Image (spheres, rainbow, N blue to C red):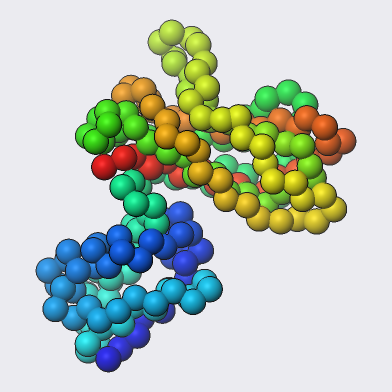
Amino acid sequence: MTDYVYSVSNDTAIGIVYQPKLRREVTRDPTLFDLYQSIVVDGDDLTISTSSALSSEKEAVLGAVVAAHVGVPNFEFVSSALLVGRDPLTVGVDWADLGFVVTTPGAFLDSGDQGAGKAVMSALTDGTGCQMRGIHRDADEGNETVLCGPFDVPDHEGAWDFFTMFSYGCTFPLNMTELCLQARRQTATSFQVKGCSMTLLKKV
């Protein structure tokens, strides 16, 4: 038996593993079906065991399956983006854009509930009393629609800390080409964000 070890946080689509779903994704591939043995998650280590060593081509296939894995039942990956990098961004009292996740028109058209999806937001934050929300700007109509949120960011005063938030079910416009993540502070005298990303999922 041969073990292949991956990082849950770095090697999967949204940093979360749902083992029954990942097992189906691995065994669904005809090149891996007969070789699969087990999946074990221990902290950040994701270990996939096979009955014998994989060829370089099959190992690349396994890595691609892991990279595409979205650890949420009934949802699959659409797109993601890093919105704020290593340099901290100070958040003010007014809603301000952190960045955009780009998608293609009709990306959610094939979902089980037409247009149904989720947004997954993660970041390092320092401070208290901040909110985030996802908005859609219609270039043709010139208006904005709040699609998810606002969400209260977990309070971390005096130290940088990491969080991940899932939106409730959202209905994304079928012509949506990007979702903007915004943030604002409420009660805090200062609030900073870095390492912020957003991922879009669609219901299947």
Q: Which residue corresponds to the image point at 30% horizontal and 79% vertical from the top-left?
A: 38
Q: Which residue corresponds to the image point at 50% horizontal and 38% vertical from the top-left?
A: 167
- Please state the horizontal and vertical placement of residue 99, each as a whole percent of the image: 57, 35
Hey, which residue is sitting farthest top in the picture? 141
- Please state the horizontal and vertical placement of residue 132, each as a whole percent of the image: 63, 34
**Is 67 drawn above or below residue 39 in the view shown?**
above
Q: Quadrant of the C terminus?
A: top left
Viewer-side residue, 39 vs 196: 39
**Is 133 drawn above or below residue 84 in the view shown?**
above
**188 sits to left or right of 49:** right
Q: Which residue corresponds to the image point at 51% horizontal and 34% vertical from the top-left?
A: 100
Does residue 149 appear anywhere in the picture?
A: yes
**Is 2 drawn above or below residue 30 in the view shown?**
below
Q: Quadrant of residue 177?
A: top left
Q: How many numbered callouts? A: 0
Hey, which residue is sitting farthest right in the picture? 189
Q: Which residue corresponds to the image point at 27% horizontal and 31% vertical from the top-left?
A: 113
**148 sits to left or right of 204:** right
Viewer-side residue, 7 vs 111: 111
**39 sits to left or right of 10:** left
Viewer-side residue, 71 vs 139: 71
- Please state the horizontal and vertical placement of residue 87, each as a whole percent of the image: 71, 49
**Is 72 drawn above or below residue 118 in the view shown?**
below
Does residue 195 appear anywhere in the picture?
A: no
Q: Quadrant of residue 55?
A: bottom left
Viewer-side residue, 121 vs 87: 121
**180 sits to left or right of 1:** right
Q: Quadrant of the N terminus?
A: bottom left
